[in-house]
Amino acid sequence: MLIVGAGFAGLGMAIRLKKAGIEDFVILERGDRVGGTWRDNTYPGAACDIPSNLYSFSFAPNPNWSRSYSESAEILDYIEYLVAAFGLKQHIRFNHNVSGLEFDEKQGLWTARLDGGGTVRARSAVMAQGPLSNASLPDIEGVAAFRGKKIHSARWDHDYDFTGKRVAVIGTGASGIQIVPELVDRVARLKVFQRTPAWVIPRPDFHTPGWNKALFRAVPASQKALREALFWTHETMAMAVIWNSPLTRLAEGLARRHLHRQVRDDWMRRQLTPDFRIGCKRVLVSNDYYPALQKDNAQLITWPIARLSENGIRTADGVEHELDCVVFATGFDVPKSGTPFSVRGRGGRELGAEWAGGARAYKSINVAGYPNLFFLFGPNSGPGHNSALVYMEAQLDYALRGVQRLMDDNLKLLDVKPAVQARHNKQLQKRLARTNWNSGCKSWYLTEDGFNATMFPGFATQYRAQMATFEDGDYEWVALKS
Protein backbone atom coordinates (compact mmCIF):
# COMPACT_ATOMS: atom_id res chain seq x y z
CA MET A 1 0.00 0.00 0.00
CA LEU A 2 1.08 3.57 -0.62
CA ILE A 3 -0.08 6.55 1.44
CA VAL A 4 0.26 10.11 0.15
CA GLY A 5 0.98 12.52 3.00
CA ALA A 6 2.42 12.31 6.52
CA GLY A 7 0.01 14.54 8.38
CA PHE A 8 -2.68 13.40 10.80
CA ALA A 9 -4.53 11.44 8.11
CA GLY A 10 -1.58 9.56 6.64
CA LEU A 11 -0.05 8.73 10.01
CA GLY A 12 -3.44 7.68 11.38
CA MET A 13 -3.85 5.28 8.45
CA ALA A 14 -0.38 3.89 9.08
CA ILE A 15 -1.16 3.30 12.75
CA ARG A 16 -4.39 1.51 11.86
CA LEU A 17 -2.51 -0.73 9.40
CA LYS A 18 0.18 -1.61 11.93
CA LYS A 19 -2.38 -2.38 14.62
CA ALA A 20 -4.02 -4.78 12.14
CA GLY A 21 -0.67 -6.50 11.52
CA ILE A 22 -0.12 -4.93 8.07
CA GLU A 23 3.47 -3.73 7.65
CA ASP A 24 3.83 -3.62 3.86
CA PHE A 25 3.13 0.06 3.22
CA VAL A 26 5.00 3.26 2.47
CA ILE A 27 4.16 6.91 3.22
CA LEU A 28 5.20 9.40 0.54
CA GLU A 29 5.74 12.85 2.06
CA ARG A 30 6.70 15.87 -0.03
CA GLY A 31 8.30 17.71 2.90
CA ASP A 32 11.29 16.87 5.06
CA ARG A 33 9.22 16.51 8.22
CA VAL A 34 5.86 15.08 9.28
CA GLY A 35 2.94 17.24 10.36
CA GLY A 36 1.09 18.48 7.28
CA THR A 37 -0.77 21.71 7.97
CA TRP A 38 0.66 21.88 11.52
CA ARG A 39 4.19 21.73 10.12
CA ASP A 40 3.44 24.45 7.57
CA ASN A 41 1.41 26.85 9.73
CA THR A 42 3.85 28.36 12.19
CA TYR A 43 2.62 31.94 12.01
CA PRO A 44 2.42 33.86 15.30
CA GLY A 45 -0.64 32.81 17.28
CA ALA A 46 -1.33 29.64 15.25
CA ALA A 47 -3.58 27.39 17.32
CA CYS A 48 -6.47 24.94 16.99
CA ASP A 49 -10.06 26.03 17.55
CA ILE A 50 -11.07 22.59 18.86
CA PRO A 51 -10.08 21.59 22.44
CA SER A 52 -6.84 19.60 22.59
CA ASN A 53 -8.41 16.59 24.28
CA LEU A 54 -10.79 16.26 21.35
CA TYR A 55 -8.34 17.28 18.63
CA SER A 56 -6.24 14.14 19.07
CA PHE A 57 -6.67 10.47 18.35
CA SER A 58 -8.82 8.53 20.82
CA PHE A 59 -6.39 5.60 20.51
CA ALA A 60 -3.40 7.81 21.37
CA PRO A 61 -4.42 10.22 24.17
CA ASN A 62 -1.97 12.85 25.37
CA PRO A 63 -2.28 13.54 29.12
CA ASN A 64 0.22 16.41 28.93
CA TRP A 65 -1.58 19.06 26.88
CA SER A 66 -0.45 22.39 28.30
CA ARG A 67 -3.75 24.19 27.75
CA SER A 68 -7.34 23.75 26.65
CA TYR A 69 -6.62 24.83 23.07
CA SER A 70 -3.11 23.95 21.95
CA GLU A 71 -0.87 26.02 19.72
CA SER A 72 0.58 24.64 16.50
CA ALA A 73 4.00 23.77 17.96
CA GLU A 74 2.47 21.55 20.63
CA ILE A 75 0.21 19.83 18.10
CA LEU A 76 3.26 19.19 15.92
CA ASP A 77 5.04 17.68 18.93
CA TYR A 78 2.05 15.35 19.36
CA ILE A 79 2.22 14.31 15.70
CA GLU A 80 5.93 13.55 16.02
CA TYR A 81 5.15 11.55 19.17
CA LEU A 82 2.81 9.39 17.08
CA VAL A 83 5.67 8.59 14.69
CA ALA A 84 7.94 7.51 17.53
CA ALA A 85 5.32 5.69 19.61
CA PHE A 86 4.04 3.57 16.73
CA GLY A 87 7.31 2.99 14.87
CA LEU A 88 6.32 4.82 11.70
CA LYS A 89 9.60 6.47 10.68
CA GLN A 90 10.83 3.40 8.79
CA HIS A 91 7.76 3.63 6.53
CA ILE A 92 8.13 7.33 5.60
CA ARG A 93 9.97 8.56 2.51
CA PHE A 94 10.59 12.27 2.92
CA ASN A 95 11.04 14.69 0.00
CA HIS A 96 8.95 12.41 -2.21
CA ASN A 97 6.47 14.69 -3.96
CA VAL A 98 3.79 12.81 -5.87
CA SER A 99 3.09 14.41 -9.26
CA GLY A 100 0.62 11.82 -10.55
CA LEU A 101 -1.25 8.65 -9.69
CA GLU A 102 -2.34 6.11 -12.32
CA PHE A 103 -4.18 2.79 -12.15
CA ASP A 104 -3.18 -0.24 -14.22
CA GLU A 105 -6.43 -2.16 -14.66
CA LYS A 106 -4.78 -5.29 -16.06
CA GLN A 107 -2.54 -5.74 -13.04
CA GLY A 108 -4.71 -4.01 -10.46
CA LEU A 109 -1.88 -1.71 -9.36
CA TRP A 110 -1.56 2.01 -8.62
CA THR A 111 1.61 3.78 -9.76
CA ALA A 112 2.65 7.00 -8.07
CA ARG A 113 4.90 9.20 -10.21
CA LEU A 114 7.37 11.32 -8.27
CA ASP A 115 9.12 14.59 -9.01
CA GLY A 116 12.50 13.62 -10.39
CA GLY A 117 11.22 10.59 -12.29
CA GLY A 118 10.84 7.86 -9.67
CA THR A 119 7.77 5.66 -9.22
CA VAL A 120 6.15 3.64 -6.45
CA ARG A 121 3.65 0.84 -7.18
CA ALA A 122 1.10 -0.67 -4.82
CA ARG A 123 -2.11 -2.72 -4.80
CA SER A 124 -3.98 0.05 -2.97
CA ALA A 125 -3.47 3.74 -2.34
CA VAL A 126 -4.62 6.30 0.22
CA MET A 127 -4.91 10.00 -0.59
CA ALA A 128 -4.05 11.61 2.75
CA GLN A 129 -2.54 14.91 1.61
CA GLY A 130 -5.28 16.85 3.42
CA PRO A 131 -7.52 19.71 2.28
CA LEU A 132 -5.39 22.47 3.86
CA SER A 133 -2.06 21.72 2.22
CA ASN A 134 -1.62 24.17 -0.68
CA ALA A 135 -1.33 27.84 0.28
CA SER A 136 -3.50 30.19 -1.78
CA LEU A 137 -2.77 33.79 -2.72
CA PRO A 138 -5.86 35.87 -3.50
CA ASP A 139 -6.81 36.71 -7.06
CA ILE A 140 -5.98 40.41 -6.70
CA GLU A 141 -4.48 42.49 -9.47
CA GLY A 142 -0.91 43.61 -8.89
CA VAL A 143 0.23 41.02 -6.33
CA ALA A 144 3.48 40.59 -8.25
CA ALA A 145 3.94 44.36 -8.55
CA PHE A 146 4.22 45.07 -4.81
CA ARG A 147 7.89 45.75 -4.00
CA GLY A 148 7.63 45.27 -0.25
CA LYS A 149 7.69 42.05 1.74
CA LYS A 150 4.96 39.47 1.00
CA ILE A 151 4.25 36.71 3.55
CA HIS A 152 1.60 33.99 3.39
CA SER A 153 0.33 32.70 6.72
CA ALA A 154 1.26 29.12 5.76
CA ARG A 155 4.76 30.12 4.60
CA TRP A 156 5.77 32.35 7.47
CA ASP A 157 9.13 34.14 7.37
CA HIS A 158 10.38 34.05 10.96
CA ASP A 159 13.48 36.07 10.04
CA TYR A 160 11.51 39.13 8.99
CA ASP A 161 11.61 41.92 11.57
CA PHE A 162 8.19 43.58 11.89
CA THR A 163 9.44 46.20 14.35
CA GLY A 164 8.43 49.68 13.27
CA LYS A 165 6.97 48.48 9.96
CA ARG A 166 3.75 49.47 8.19
CA VAL A 167 1.95 46.15 7.80
CA ALA A 168 -1.29 45.00 6.19
CA VAL A 169 -3.14 41.77 6.91
CA ILE A 170 -5.43 40.65 4.09
CA GLY A 171 -8.03 38.21 5.35
CA THR A 172 -10.03 37.96 8.56
CA GLY A 173 -10.66 34.22 8.71
CA ALA A 174 -9.30 31.65 11.14
CA SER A 175 -5.62 32.49 10.57
CA GLY A 176 -6.11 36.25 10.21
CA ILE A 177 -7.78 36.70 13.59
CA GLN A 178 -4.91 34.81 15.23
CA ILE A 179 -2.17 36.80 13.47
CA VAL A 180 -3.57 40.30 14.11
CA PRO A 181 -3.26 40.24 17.94
CA GLU A 182 0.31 38.93 17.65
CA LEU A 183 1.48 41.63 15.24
CA VAL A 184 -0.30 44.71 16.52
CA ASP A 185 2.14 45.38 19.37
CA ARG A 186 5.21 44.79 17.18
CA VAL A 187 4.48 47.06 14.23
CA ALA A 188 4.27 50.81 13.76
CA ARG A 189 0.97 50.57 11.90
CA LEU A 190 -1.33 47.62 11.23
CA LYS A 191 -4.09 47.79 8.62
CA VAL A 192 -6.54 44.90 8.53
CA PHE A 193 -8.40 44.48 5.23
CA GLN A 194 -11.74 42.78 5.76
CA ARG A 195 -13.90 41.55 2.89
CA THR A 196 -16.62 39.91 4.99
CA PRO A 197 -17.02 39.97 8.79
CA ALA A 198 -17.29 36.63 10.57
CA TRP A 199 -19.21 35.41 13.58
CA VAL A 200 -16.74 35.28 16.47
CA ILE A 201 -17.39 33.55 19.78
CA PRO A 202 -15.19 33.55 22.93
CA ARG A 203 -12.55 30.87 23.44
CA PRO A 204 -12.63 29.17 26.88
CA ASP A 205 -8.86 28.64 26.92
CA PHE A 206 -6.99 27.85 30.14
CA HIS A 207 -3.61 26.51 31.18
CA THR A 208 -3.78 22.90 32.35
CA PRO A 209 -2.66 22.63 35.99
CA GLY A 210 -0.10 20.02 36.99
CA TRP A 211 -2.58 18.04 39.09
CA ASN A 212 -4.83 17.66 36.06
CA LYS A 213 -2.03 16.17 33.98
CA ALA A 214 -1.09 13.85 36.83
CA LEU A 215 -4.71 12.71 37.12
CA PHE A 216 -4.88 11.92 33.38
CA ARG A 217 -1.65 9.92 33.61
CA ALA A 218 -2.74 7.99 36.71
CA VAL A 219 -6.39 7.49 35.71
CA PRO A 220 -6.72 7.43 31.90
CA ALA A 221 -10.48 6.96 32.26
CA SER A 222 -10.72 10.53 33.58
CA GLN A 223 -9.28 11.91 30.35
CA LYS A 224 -11.57 9.67 28.32
CA ALA A 225 -14.55 11.01 30.27
CA LEU A 226 -13.49 14.60 29.51
CA ARG A 227 -13.14 13.75 25.83
CA GLU A 228 -16.66 12.32 25.80
CA ALA A 229 -18.03 15.42 27.50
CA LEU A 230 -16.31 17.67 24.95
CA PHE A 231 -17.59 15.51 22.10
CA TRP A 232 -21.22 15.74 23.17
CA THR A 233 -20.93 19.46 23.89
CA HIS A 234 -19.76 19.99 20.32
CA GLU A 235 -22.45 17.66 18.97
CA THR A 236 -25.05 19.95 20.53
CA MET A 237 -23.51 22.86 18.62
CA ALA A 238 -24.57 21.20 15.36
CA MET A 239 -28.13 22.33 16.04
CA ALA A 240 -26.90 25.92 16.02
CA VAL A 241 -24.48 25.99 13.10
CA ILE A 242 -25.65 23.31 10.65
CA TRP A 243 -29.40 23.96 10.64
CA ASN A 244 -31.54 27.01 11.32
CA SER A 245 -33.07 26.38 14.75
CA PRO A 246 -33.73 28.24 18.01
CA LEU A 247 -30.15 27.35 18.99
CA THR A 248 -28.98 29.31 15.95
CA ARG A 249 -30.44 32.48 17.46
CA LEU A 250 -28.83 31.64 20.80
CA ALA A 251 -25.44 31.22 19.13
CA GLU A 252 -25.82 34.49 17.25
CA GLY A 253 -26.81 36.17 20.52
CA LEU A 254 -23.66 34.84 22.19
CA ALA A 255 -21.52 36.18 19.36
CA ARG A 256 -23.26 39.58 19.44
CA ARG A 257 -22.78 39.88 23.20
CA HIS A 258 -19.11 39.00 22.76
CA LEU A 259 -18.81 41.76 20.13
CA HIS A 260 -20.66 44.33 22.28
CA ARG A 261 -18.57 43.54 25.35
CA GLN A 262 -15.28 43.94 23.51
CA VAL A 263 -15.93 46.70 20.95
CA ARG A 264 -16.86 50.15 22.25
CA ASP A 265 -17.42 52.00 18.97
CA ASP A 266 -20.87 51.61 17.38
CA TRP A 267 -19.57 52.06 13.83
CA MET A 268 -16.89 49.43 14.28
CA ARG A 269 -19.48 47.04 15.72
CA ARG A 270 -21.56 47.54 12.59
CA GLN A 271 -18.54 46.81 10.40
CA LEU A 272 -17.83 43.62 12.35
CA THR A 273 -21.40 42.30 12.36
CA PRO A 274 -22.13 39.63 9.72
CA ASP A 275 -25.23 39.86 7.52
CA PHE A 276 -25.52 36.08 7.10
CA ARG A 277 -26.72 33.26 9.34
CA ILE A 278 -24.20 31.84 11.78
CA GLY A 279 -22.70 28.64 10.41
CA CYS A 280 -22.96 29.73 6.77
CA LYS A 281 -19.24 30.49 6.99
CA ARG A 282 -16.79 29.06 9.47
CA VAL A 283 -17.48 30.21 13.03
CA LEU A 284 -14.34 31.72 14.59
CA VAL A 285 -13.17 31.68 18.20
CA SER A 286 -11.05 34.40 19.75
CA ASN A 287 -10.69 36.47 22.91
CA ASP A 288 -8.13 38.95 21.64
CA TYR A 289 -9.00 39.79 18.02
CA TYR A 290 -11.53 42.54 18.75
CA PRO A 291 -9.31 44.25 21.36
CA ALA A 292 -6.38 44.18 18.90
CA LEU A 293 -8.42 46.01 16.25
CA GLN A 294 -8.99 48.86 18.71
CA LYS A 295 -5.33 49.53 19.46
CA ASP A 296 -4.20 53.05 18.55
CA ASN A 297 -1.95 51.77 15.75
CA ALA A 298 -4.56 49.44 14.21
CA GLN A 299 -7.13 50.22 11.53
CA LEU A 300 -9.95 48.08 10.14
CA ILE A 301 -10.51 48.72 6.44
CA THR A 302 -13.66 47.43 4.76
CA TRP A 303 -13.34 49.12 1.37
CA PRO A 304 -12.70 46.46 -1.32
CA ILE A 305 -9.14 46.10 -2.51
CA ALA A 306 -8.79 47.36 -6.07
CA ARG A 307 -5.20 46.26 -6.59
CA LEU A 308 -1.74 46.02 -5.09
CA SER A 309 0.64 48.69 -6.29
CA GLU A 310 4.41 48.99 -6.04
CA ASN A 311 4.13 50.75 -2.69
CA GLY A 312 1.10 49.19 -1.08
CA ILE A 313 -2.62 48.54 -1.49
CA ARG A 314 -5.09 50.67 -3.40
CA THR A 315 -8.72 50.39 -2.26
CA ALA A 316 -11.89 51.04 -4.24
CA ASP A 317 -12.31 54.49 -2.64
CA GLY A 318 -9.13 55.63 -4.38
CA VAL A 319 -6.89 55.60 -1.28
CA GLU A 320 -3.41 54.13 -1.62
CA HIS A 321 -2.13 52.60 1.63
CA GLU A 322 1.66 52.69 1.70
CA LEU A 323 3.11 49.57 3.27
CA ASP A 324 6.33 47.77 4.06
CA CYS A 325 4.80 44.31 4.32
CA VAL A 326 1.61 42.51 3.26
CA VAL A 327 0.53 39.39 5.15
CA PHE A 328 -1.83 37.15 3.18
CA ALA A 329 -4.07 35.30 5.63
CA THR A 330 -6.04 34.02 2.67
CA GLY A 331 -6.20 30.31 3.32
CA PHE A 332 -5.72 27.37 0.99
CA ASP A 333 -6.73 25.91 -2.33
CA VAL A 334 -9.32 23.51 -0.90
CA PRO A 335 -10.02 20.82 -3.54
CA LYS A 336 -13.80 21.27 -3.91
CA SER A 337 -13.17 20.42 -7.55
CA GLY A 338 -10.13 19.00 -9.25
CA THR A 339 -7.28 17.19 -7.53
CA PRO A 340 -3.82 18.28 -6.27
CA PHE A 341 -2.21 16.18 -9.01
CA SER A 342 -3.39 14.03 -11.92
CA VAL A 343 -5.26 10.89 -10.84
CA ARG A 344 -6.11 8.43 -13.63
CA GLY A 345 -8.40 5.46 -13.07
CA ARG A 346 -10.00 2.72 -15.14
CA GLY A 347 -9.99 3.26 -18.89
CA GLY A 348 -7.74 6.30 -18.57
CA ARG A 349 -10.43 8.42 -16.92
CA GLU A 350 -9.10 11.52 -15.14
CA LEU A 351 -10.48 12.47 -11.74
CA GLY A 352 -9.79 16.18 -12.04
CA ALA A 353 -11.94 16.36 -15.17
CA GLU A 354 -14.74 14.36 -13.55
CA TRP A 355 -14.67 16.63 -10.52
CA ALA A 356 -14.56 19.87 -12.54
CA GLY A 357 -18.14 20.68 -11.52
CA GLY A 358 -17.64 19.59 -7.91
CA ALA A 359 -16.08 16.61 -6.16
CA ARG A 360 -18.26 13.56 -5.55
CA ALA A 361 -17.47 10.32 -3.76
CA TYR A 362 -19.16 7.46 -1.96
CA LYS A 363 -19.16 8.00 1.82
CA SER A 364 -16.41 10.59 1.12
CA ILE A 365 -13.86 7.81 0.73
CA ASN A 366 -14.26 5.91 -2.56
CA VAL A 367 -14.88 7.10 -6.13
CA ALA A 368 -16.39 4.93 -8.87
CA GLY A 369 -13.85 4.09 -11.56
CA TYR A 370 -10.88 4.46 -9.21
CA PRO A 371 -10.56 1.03 -7.58
CA ASN A 372 -8.52 0.31 -4.46
CA LEU A 373 -8.17 4.06 -3.84
CA PHE A 374 -9.25 5.61 -0.53
CA PHE A 375 -9.64 9.30 0.24
CA LEU A 376 -9.17 10.68 3.75
CA PHE A 377 -10.85 14.06 4.25
CA GLY A 378 -12.52 13.36 0.92
CA PRO A 379 -15.63 15.09 -0.48
CA ASN A 380 -18.34 15.95 2.05
CA SER A 381 -16.44 14.79 5.11
CA GLY A 382 -15.99 18.23 6.66
CA PRO A 383 -17.39 18.96 10.12
CA GLY A 384 -18.82 22.34 10.96
CA HIS A 385 -19.09 21.82 14.70
CA ASN A 386 -16.90 18.95 15.94
CA SER A 387 -13.34 17.67 15.75
CA ALA A 388 -12.12 16.68 12.30
CA LEU A 389 -10.22 13.82 13.93
CA VAL A 390 -13.50 12.23 15.06
CA TYR A 391 -14.54 12.07 11.42
CA MET A 392 -11.08 10.94 10.39
CA GLU A 393 -11.06 7.97 12.75
CA ALA A 394 -14.28 6.72 11.16
CA GLN A 395 -12.65 7.03 7.73
CA LEU A 396 -9.53 5.17 8.89
CA ASP A 397 -11.60 2.24 10.13
CA TYR A 398 -13.57 2.11 6.87
CA ALA A 399 -10.45 2.27 4.69
CA LEU A 400 -8.82 -0.46 6.76
CA ARG A 401 -11.80 -2.74 6.13
CA GLY A 402 -11.45 -2.12 2.39
CA VAL A 403 -7.72 -2.87 2.45
CA GLN A 404 -8.33 -6.05 4.43
CA ARG A 405 -10.93 -7.19 1.87
CA LEU A 406 -8.39 -6.69 -0.92
CA MET A 407 -5.84 -8.79 0.93
CA ASP A 408 -8.05 -11.48 2.43
CA ASP A 409 -9.97 -12.17 -0.80
CA ASN A 410 -6.95 -11.69 -3.10
CA LEU A 411 -8.73 -9.02 -5.10
CA LYS A 412 -7.47 -7.14 -8.11
CA LEU A 413 -10.29 -4.58 -8.01
CA LEU A 414 -12.57 -3.23 -5.33
CA ASP A 415 -14.60 -0.50 -7.00
CA VAL A 416 -17.75 1.23 -5.74
CA LYS A 417 -20.63 0.93 -8.19
CA PRO A 418 -21.50 4.15 -10.08
CA ALA A 419 -25.23 3.84 -9.30
CA VAL A 420 -24.50 3.46 -5.59
CA GLN A 421 -22.30 6.57 -5.63
CA ALA A 422 -24.88 8.58 -7.56
CA ARG A 423 -27.69 7.61 -5.16
CA HIS A 424 -25.52 8.51 -2.15
CA ASN A 425 -24.70 11.95 -3.54
CA LYS A 426 -28.28 12.71 -4.52
CA GLN A 427 -29.36 12.12 -0.93
CA LEU A 428 -26.37 14.08 0.38
CA GLN A 429 -27.07 17.18 -1.70
CA LYS A 430 -30.76 17.05 -0.78
CA ARG A 431 -29.78 17.18 2.90
CA LEU A 432 -27.18 19.90 2.29
CA ALA A 433 -29.80 22.14 0.67
CA ARG A 434 -31.45 22.50 4.09
CA THR A 435 -28.26 23.53 5.94
CA ASN A 436 -26.90 26.93 6.91
CA TRP A 437 -23.88 26.35 4.64
CA ASN A 438 -26.18 26.49 1.63
CA SER A 439 -28.25 29.41 2.90
CA GLY A 440 -26.84 32.04 0.54
CA CYS A 441 -23.43 33.32 1.64
CA LYS A 442 -20.20 32.76 -0.28
CA SER A 443 -17.69 30.55 1.50
CA TRP A 444 -14.79 28.19 0.85
CA TYR A 445 -17.23 25.33 1.48
CA LEU A 446 -18.85 25.95 -1.92
CA THR A 447 -17.72 25.96 -5.53
CA GLU A 448 -18.21 29.11 -7.59
CA ASP A 449 -21.64 27.88 -8.70
CA GLY A 450 -22.72 26.97 -5.16
CA PHE A 451 -22.10 23.21 -5.11
CA ASN A 452 -21.18 21.98 -1.63
CA ALA A 453 -18.48 19.32 -1.97
CA THR A 454 -16.95 19.99 1.43
CA MET A 455 -19.28 19.52 4.38
CA PHE A 456 -21.20 16.58 5.85
CA PRO A 457 -24.83 17.55 6.57
CA GLY A 458 -25.30 16.01 9.96
CA PHE A 459 -23.97 15.10 13.38
CA ALA A 460 -20.62 13.41 13.90
CA THR A 461 -22.57 10.46 15.30
CA GLN A 462 -24.42 10.20 11.98
CA TYR A 463 -21.15 10.30 10.07
CA ARG A 464 -19.69 7.56 12.24
CA ALA A 465 -22.83 5.46 11.73
CA GLN A 466 -22.50 5.93 7.96
CA MET A 467 -18.90 4.69 8.05
CA ALA A 468 -19.55 1.82 10.46
CA THR A 469 -20.90 -0.53 7.78
CA PHE A 470 -19.03 -1.81 4.73
CA GLU A 471 -21.71 -3.09 2.36
CA ASP A 472 -20.29 -5.74 0.03
CA GLY A 473 -23.12 -5.20 -2.46
CA ASP A 474 -22.09 -1.57 -2.98
CA TYR A 475 -18.87 -2.66 -4.68
CA GLU A 476 -17.69 -4.48 -7.76
CA TRP A 477 -15.29 -7.28 -6.86
CA VAL A 478 -12.70 -8.72 -9.27
CA ALA A 479 -10.33 -11.42 -8.05
CA LEU A 480 -6.72 -11.82 -9.09
CA LYS A 481 -6.13 -14.80 -11.35
CA SER A 482 -4.09 -17.47 -9.61
Image (tube, helix red, strand yellow):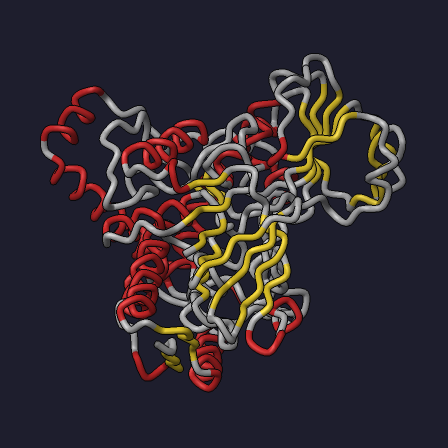
Q: At 38% from the left edge and 78% from the top edge, which residue is drawn? A: 481
Return the residue nearer the eye: 339 or 280: 339
- Decide if residue 382 is in sight here: no
Tell me: 415 left or right of 235: right
Give x and y (percent) for residue 289. 54, 32
Which residue is rendered at x = 68% and y = 18% of the image?
A: 160
Compared to 50, does 451 lie above or below?
A: below
* The N terminus lies in quadrant: bottom left
Q: Position of residue 87 (x, y in %)?
A: 30, 37
Q: Is residue 275 above or below residue 289?
A: below
- When asked about the image quadrant of residue 55, the answer is top left
Along the viewing direction, whichever of 382 and 401 lies nearer the viewer: 401
Give whichever of 129, 1 is nearer the camera.
Answer: 1
Image position of 175 (left or right of 137): left
- Residue displayed at 68% across by 37% down: 328
- Spot occupied by residue 382 in the image (x, y as percentages of width and height): 45, 58
Q: Does the rendering let one see residue 426?
A: yes
Q: Residue furthest bottom?
A: 419
Q: Residue furthest front?
A: 482
Position in image of residue 452 (x %, y %): 55, 67
Q: Quadrant of the C terminus?
A: bottom left
In the image, residue 464 sits, relative to residue 176, either above or below, namely below
Task: Identify whether 23 is placed above or below 190.
Answer: below
